[in-house]
């Protein structure tokens, strides 16, 4: 990595690492060459004969911390010594009482001692610069902090432990081996020598393209697991969309009325089901209207349909015709175009049903669930259906891509590999083919931070909270 403004951070930094506000306990963290000596000047351990600089890492000490005005608080000091710390530097963690006044007074004392306040994500940045983490693992730290469900937590944890990094590095090593043979041929181009067997190279390229394509395809599932799977509840007015939302959430989230067009805007709420976050969206009823506010609501409904991964199309079993339903579904498919959406039909109001309809065989391509949202009957069948497809996707996929930056790099690497394959197919010169190989190597290197720039680092670490 070239020397840049991020590469030589030899000063000592500090930050409050717990959330802002009053709490029982707060933690202030320091990292850098002067972290231990700075604390030793202001901290008096209960055991008076102890010097922090002489102590081993992974140890804790109880005592008083003071400034020029006197005692600030009784604290616990956690000691971590380089290189065996989160940042790879000497790290001190001060656990104090959670008073905002106490926290700020300790911070003022530290800055008076010449310790600099850390920038957002600077502790993790230093972990990356000191090779404690690669760049994709560093990004996973932020994802782990932001995780709101079991699925998003496991996704971030797997990436932070290096599962994704190992996959990328394995692909990059295969590509490096491939590139070395091609470069060797360039060195002996005048002698017309082939060091690489073309059938073997084609086989390797096919394996690389397949692996990259699988990673690119996994983003669809990885992204929704990270942010919550959007499920749009759509249908005509007064078919029970809001009642269904309330039944799924098990609370009165949406206003329910027999008056058509009650819901004029989208209502969203998130629920975690077996560790997977689902973001349910109740939408305005689809119908022709002259009401300006309702028209805006219907426009937003179409926007949410495009954003959703799963669509629950609900209809009233007592007031529908199969031909009209087929027409509505055909219209929906046309509006979706090539967007890959799972559509589940929800036949509602079984509690009012007089006669069971027999013509659903004409809709065999759609999964259909019959419910009474008012009585909360068969709601569990909807939940089971939603879980089934997601759990199947997780089982079938070894590594899931959930980061948009990674996706973009993988797409560019895949494009370059495809260009290499086409180059061999049309007999392109080896020197031109090698250019595409270098592009693929560069893109894979940017994912883990083997190759990076100030712009990439700024973009990644500016999104972190201060103190991490």
Image (cartoon, helix red, strand yellow):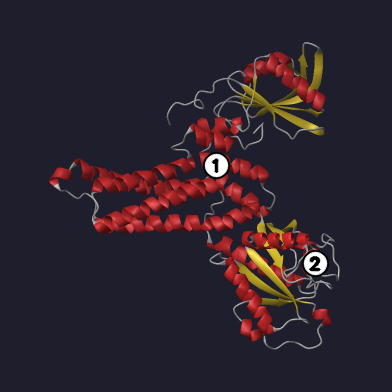
Q: Where does the image place residue 97, in percent across and percent down from the top left?
A: 80, 28
Q: Quadrant of residue 13?
A: top right
Q: Quadrant of residue 137?
A: top right
Q: How many marks?
A: 2
Residue for point 61% across, 75% down: 330
Q: Which residue shows up at 66% across the image and 35% down it?
A: 465
Query: In screen coordinates, is 194 left or right of 115?
Result: left
Q: Which residue is under mark 2?
A: 261
Q: Local crowd at mark 1 within 10 Å, few (<14), some, or many (≥20)?
A: many
Q: Could you tell me residue 244's position as x and y percent?
A: 78, 68
Question: For residue 137, which numbered disc appears in the image?
Answer: 1
Please state which of residues 295 and 266 is positioned toward the viewer in this rendering. Answer: 295
> Where's the N terminus, which quadrant?
top left
Residue lying at the far front in this picture: please name it: 290
* Residue 403: x %, y % from top left: 56, 48
Question: Which of the numbered marks, if any, corresponds to residue 241?
Answer: none
Which of discs 1 and 2 lies nearer the camera? The answer is 2
50 is higher (above) or lower (below) than 197: above
Helix, strand or loop for disc 1 = helix
Q: Quadrant of residue 237?
A: bottom right
Name the quadrant of the C terminus.
top right
Tag 2 secondary structure: loop
The residue lying toward the viewer, choosing from 379 and 362, is 362
In the image, residue 137 above or below residue 53: below
* Residue farthest to the left, as pictured: 191
Q: Residues within 10 Å of mark 2 (few under 14, many from 20)?
A: many
Front one among 215 and 411:
411
**One can see residue 221 in this view:** yes
Residue located 23% across and 49% down the image: 429
Query: How far, Cα to Cα, is label 1 from label 2?
Result: 48 Å
Q: Residue furthest top?
A: 68
């Amino acid at each position: 990595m070239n020397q840049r403004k991020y590469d030589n951070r030899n000063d000592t930094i500090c930050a409050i690492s717990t959330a802002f506000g009053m709490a029982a306990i707060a933690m202030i963290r320091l990292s850098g060459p002067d972290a231990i000596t700075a604390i030793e000047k202001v901290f008096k351990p209960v055991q008076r004969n102890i010097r922090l600089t002489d102590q081993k890492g992974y140890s804790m000490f109880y005592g008083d911390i003071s400034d020029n005005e006197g005692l600030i608080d009784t604290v616990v000091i956690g000691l971590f010594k380089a290189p065996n710390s989160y940042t790879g530097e000497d790290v001190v963690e001060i656990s104090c009482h959670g008073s905002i006044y106490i926290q700020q007074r300790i911070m003022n004392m530290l800055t008076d001692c010449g310790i600099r306040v850390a920038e957002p994500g600077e502790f993790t940045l230093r972990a990356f610069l000191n090779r404690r983490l690669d760049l994709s693992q560093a990004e996973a730290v932020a994802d782990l902090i932001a995780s709101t469900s079991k699925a998003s937590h496991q996704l971030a944890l797997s990436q932070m432990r290096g599962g994704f990094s190992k996959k990328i590095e394995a692909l990059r090593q295969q590509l490096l081996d491939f590139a070395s043979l091609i470069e060797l041929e360039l060195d002996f181009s005048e002698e017309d020598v082939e060091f690489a067997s073309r059938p073997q190279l084609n086989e390797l390229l096919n394996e690389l393209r397949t692996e990259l394509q699988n990673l690119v395809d996994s983003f669809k599932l990885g992204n929704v697991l990270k942010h919550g799977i959007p499920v749009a509840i759509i249908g005509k007015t007064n078919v029970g969309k809001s009642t269904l939302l309330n039944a799924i959430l098990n609370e009165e989230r949406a206003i329910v009325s027999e008056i058509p067009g009650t819901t004029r805007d989208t209502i969203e709420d998130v629920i975690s089901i077996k560790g997977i976050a689902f973001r349910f969206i109740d939408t305005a009823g689809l119908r022709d209207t002259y009401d300006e506010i309702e028209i805006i609501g219907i426009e937003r409904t179409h926007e949410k349909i495009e954003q959703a991964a799963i669509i629950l199309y609900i209809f009233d079993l007592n007031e529908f015709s199969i031909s009209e339903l087929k027409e509505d579904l055909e219209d929906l498919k046309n509006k979706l175009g090539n967007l890959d959406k799972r559509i589940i039909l929800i036949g509602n109001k079984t509690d009012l049903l007089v006669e069971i309809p027999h013509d659903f065989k004409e809709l065999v391509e759609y999964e259909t669930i019959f419910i009474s949202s008012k009585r909360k009957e068969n709601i569990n069948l909807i939940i089971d259906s939603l879980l089934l497809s997601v759990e199947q996707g997780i089982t079938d996929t070894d590594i899931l891509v959930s980061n948009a930056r990674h996706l973009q790099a993988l797409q560019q690497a895949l494009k370059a590999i495809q260009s290499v394959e086409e180059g061999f197919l049309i007999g392109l010169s080896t020197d031109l083919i090698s250019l595409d190989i270098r592009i693929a190597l560069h893109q894979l290197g940017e994912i883990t931070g083997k190759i990076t720039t100030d712009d990439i680092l700024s973009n990644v670490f500016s999104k972190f909270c201060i103190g991490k």
